[in-house]
Image: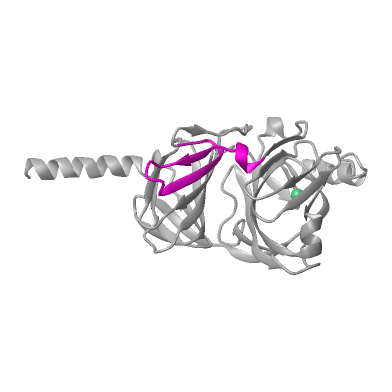
Amino acid sequence: MTAKTIANTTRSISREKISRDVLEVVQSVNTFEGAGFPVRRPFPTNHFQNPDPFILLDEMGPVRYGAGEAKGAPDHPHRGFETVTYVLEGEMQHKDSHGHDGKLGSGDVQWMTAGAGVVHSEMPSEHMQKNGGRMHGFQLWVNLPKKSKMAKPRYQEFPGSRLPIAESVKKEVWARVIAGECMGKRAVIETHTPIMYLHFRLRPGAEFTQPVSNDFHVIAYVFEGSGTFGNNQQEVAGGQLAIFDSIGSEISFRNDGTKTMQLLLLGGKPLNEPVIQYGPFVMNTSEEIEQAFRDYQSGKMGAIRF
Ligand code: FE
């Protein structure tokens, strides 16, 4: 063996140790949520349950509504976790049982800690309901650790203009930093447990390597274009979710297509606690789920009164 091949071998072994492989690529399913708006759901599905600490990911649309057609999710409760709404196109209006309301537009994020319980509505804005328009966005459900499940509900709402944007020197890689850190830009949103939530846009030919904590579960959801992911070079197309191996401290991906690739890169430290989910409640035991139903039905989570 020559010095050159030894050097190459050493490099490839150390690269295998740090860059994670893709374990599995799963297809999202098309379904409906709320009052009947279309979503692409990468998880949970029959093929793939929840990657602790995440519970659910829905891509809302993209859909173009005609006048009077736009649908949302009227009044419903949540307890025991967080809902993260990220709007790419369109306008969403929300109200809740604590008297809070607001509107989310393109690039805006609402990180809602349901904690002990809220009743809220998530609807297209009145303007969209009346005139129609394009709607596209995401909702992610992040589980809360046992000690925070009954925390006081909290909102963190940021317009896109206040969320950090990271860009490579040549501007072929762009990222909105919703949680965690990317290219030296740190998120402004606070999380209960360590979470990474990055929206990437890569031009054709661009590639990127994101450092991740060794103890994170990591997934990538491609929603536009396609690319090659992981140390083992797996093809991931639009509407597919890549689940990464737990060994390694880097996630690499490349856009080898001819159009822009967009993806969400999500990571989090697993809670390793029992997860009992029933509809809008995510708790640790079935008794706690029954209690949540009782509290909701007896009005303890409140109601929207405005
Ligand atoms: Fe909700």
**Does residue 274 appear to the left or right of 305 in the view shown?**
left
Give residue 241's position: percent from left, percent from top: 51, 57
**55 above or below 204?**
above
Residue 284 seen anywhere in this rendered image of the structure: no
Front residue (pair 238, 55): 238
Q: Is residue 191 part of the magenta span, yes or no?
A: no
- The magenta-colored residue range is 159-182
Quadrant position of the C terminus in the picture: top right
Quadrant location of residue 273?
top right
Residue at x 49%, y 39% (from the top left corner): 216
Residue 218, how many percent across, how many down?
Answer: 49, 45
Residue 88 horizontal/vertical position (percent): 62, 53
Q: Residue furthest bottom?
A: 66
Q: Nearer the viewer, residue 198 or 219?
A: 198
Residue 106 visible in the picture: yes
With respect to residue 59, does 30 lie above or below? below
Split into 4 quadrants, where in the image is the N terminus? top left
x and y percentages locating residue 120 in the rendered image = 81, 46
Q: Nearer the viewer, residue 146 or 130?
A: 130
Q: Residue at x 49, y 34 (%)?
A: 185
